[in-house]
Amino acid sequence: MSISGFFPSLSSSQIASAQGIDEQRVKEIVDEKIKESQSTEQVAINFVNELNSLLKFLYTILRPLLFLAGLAVDNSLVYGEIFHFDAILIQIWNIMRDFANFSLFFIALYFIFKEMRKQNTAGIQKVIKQMLIAGILIQASWFLMSAIIDLSTIAIVAIGGLP
């Protein structure tokens, strides 16, 4: 490759005369730079190839494990349908939800009476807002947990199915 490839507007004799060195030395310097750039490109290509081989190896090892994890974590195992735990889980959740509702009611009454004794209407409004939010979250807890479990199951199966 000639020097005109790097400096198309200048010839090697113009570059040599401008720097006070001979044309042969300029060609040697340019050839060295070309070899260095080619070796840098080759190092980058080798690195990418090695990284690709490593990732293929890791994927070969991890793919069966991710596939098994995707099979193991489906809703029938999570909710215990195989052992008929799903009906028991719903009953336990209903009991805990009722307990939380009664607790929430008594806590709300306590804070409302406390704020009434202070004659603080802003405090009563704040307590009512907080208790309404807590009540909605209690009622939606089964759905929220089911949604979280389903999303995690979908994510695990998706990761297991990556090529």
Image (cartoon, grey):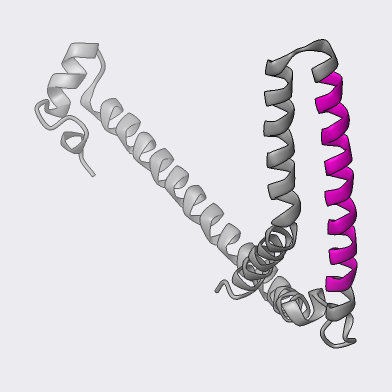
* Residue 122, placed above or below residue 103: above
The dominant secondary structure in magenta is helix
Q: Who's the residue at 12% across and 28% down the image?
A: 11
Q: Nearer the viewer, residue 75 or 12?
A: 75
Q: In the picture, residue 70 is in which quadrant?
A: bottom right
Q: Who's the residue at 17% across and 28% down the image?
A: 12
Tell whether position 71 is magenta: no
Instruction: Report x, y in % for residue 108.
Output: 82, 34
Instruction: Report x, y in % for residue 21.
Output: 26, 16
Instruction: Report x, y in % for residue 124.
Output: 73, 23
Q: Nearer the viewer, residue 157 or 15?
A: 157
Q: Who's the residue at 81% across and 19% down the image?
A: 115
Horizontal side of 111 relative to 74 (left or right) equals right
| Quadrant (top left, top right, bottom left, bottom right) of the C terminus | bottom right
Horizontal side of 162 relative to 4 (left or right) equals right
* Residue 92, placed above or below residue 88: above
Q: Who's the residue at 53% across and 61% down the image?
A: 49
* Residue 150, placed above or below residue 104: below
Q: Nearer the viewer, residue 102 or 88?
A: 102
Horizontal side of 114 relative to 25 (left or right) equals right
Q: In the picture, residue 67 is in which quadrant?
A: bottom right
| Quadrant (top left, top right, bottom left, bottom right) of the N terminus | top left
Instruction: Report x, y in % for residue 127.
Output: 74, 28
Q: Nearer the viewer, residue 72 or 122?
A: 122
Q: Which residues are magenta?
A: 90-115
